[in-house]
Image (cartoon, rainbow, N blue to C red):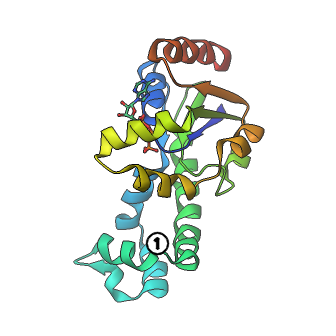
Amino acid sequence: MKIVGLTGGIGSGKTTVIKMFAALGVPVYIADIEAKKLMNSSPIIREKLIKLLGNEAYQNDKLNRKFVADKIFNNKNLLEGVNAIIHPEVGLHFDKWREQQTSDYVIKEAAILFENGSYKNCDVVILVTAPEEVRIARVMKRDGVTKSQVEARIKNQWPDSKKRELADIVIENIDLEDTQNLVNDIHIYLS
Ligand code: ATP
């Protein structure tokens, strides 16, 4: 079974593309969603986050999202510390999930697949891209945020030029029909 990593910058259309693969019957693992769930359910993550951030990191057995977000906002060391706690647990959870799948390939979607190095555990890496001005316009419309807010989020991610060098397949997600056709072709190639 091949492990296919799928990534892309904010507003590139990762979720849109992953839904196309899922509709073709491909098992998909959305790392951000699973990470959020694990932050509430994993005793190991809880213990380490409390050690790093203090008891207030959890409230009534649930992650205190606001407290954690405030703590890591503009604090690169703490952000890296939090990622270093969560990332290995997501990796283990993904491995267990994958063992239960029986398809030719599975897809792991992660916004920071390159940034956190987990692309190294993938057999194939797909990068979803779109011109920056298109991505900004999409996110402004989807999230009701300003241009500079989107630009700030883009600045925290690797530039597409760097990601392209490491990707095996690039999906230029501009026209939805073109994207769907490409996804169909990639599915045949990977099956
Ligand atoms: P994020 O990193 O913020 O989670 P994402 O990469 O998952 O974003 P999507 O949520 O899939 O991106 O797409 C961003 C927005 O752009 C959504 O509202 C989506 O419907 C829209 N969109 C995606 N692809 C296209 C396209 N080819 N044409 C028009 N709109 C699109």
Q: Residue at x 57, y 40 (%)?
A: 8
Q: Residues within 10 Å of mark 1 (few under 14, many from 20)?
A: some
User: What quarter of the picture does the C terminus occupy?
Assistant: top right
In-image side of 151 versus 112 (left or right): left
* In the depicted structure, whether residue 2 falls above or below residue 159: above
- Judging depth in this view, the residue of 90 and 116 nearest the camera is 116
| Ligand 1 position by quadrant | top left
Q: Residue at x 58, y 54 (%)?
A: 157
Count of residue discs: 1
Q: Residue at x 39, y 58 (%)?
A: 36
Q: Residue at x 30, y 72 (%)?
A: 66
* In the depicted structure, whether residue 131 falls above or below residue 42: above
Residue labelled with disc 1: 45
- Judging depth in this view, the residue of 12 and 180 nearest the camera is 12
User: What quarter of the picture does the N terminus occupy?
Assistant: top right
Q: Secondary structure at mark 1?
A: helix
> Is label 1 within 8 A of ligand 1 (CB to nearest ligand atom)?
no
Kind of residue at badge 1: Ile
Q: Position of residue 172 (x, y in %)?
A: 59, 25
Q: Position of residue 187 (x, y in %)?
A: 59, 17
**Does any portion of residue 159 appear in the rendered image?**
yes
* In the depicted structure, whether residue 186 falls above or below residue 16: above
**Does any portion of residue 63 appear in the rendered image?**
no
Q: Position of residue 35 (x, y in %)?
A: 44, 57
Q: Quadrant of residue 3?
A: top right
In-image side of 62 versus 163 (left or right): left
**Residue sitting farthest toward the right:** 165
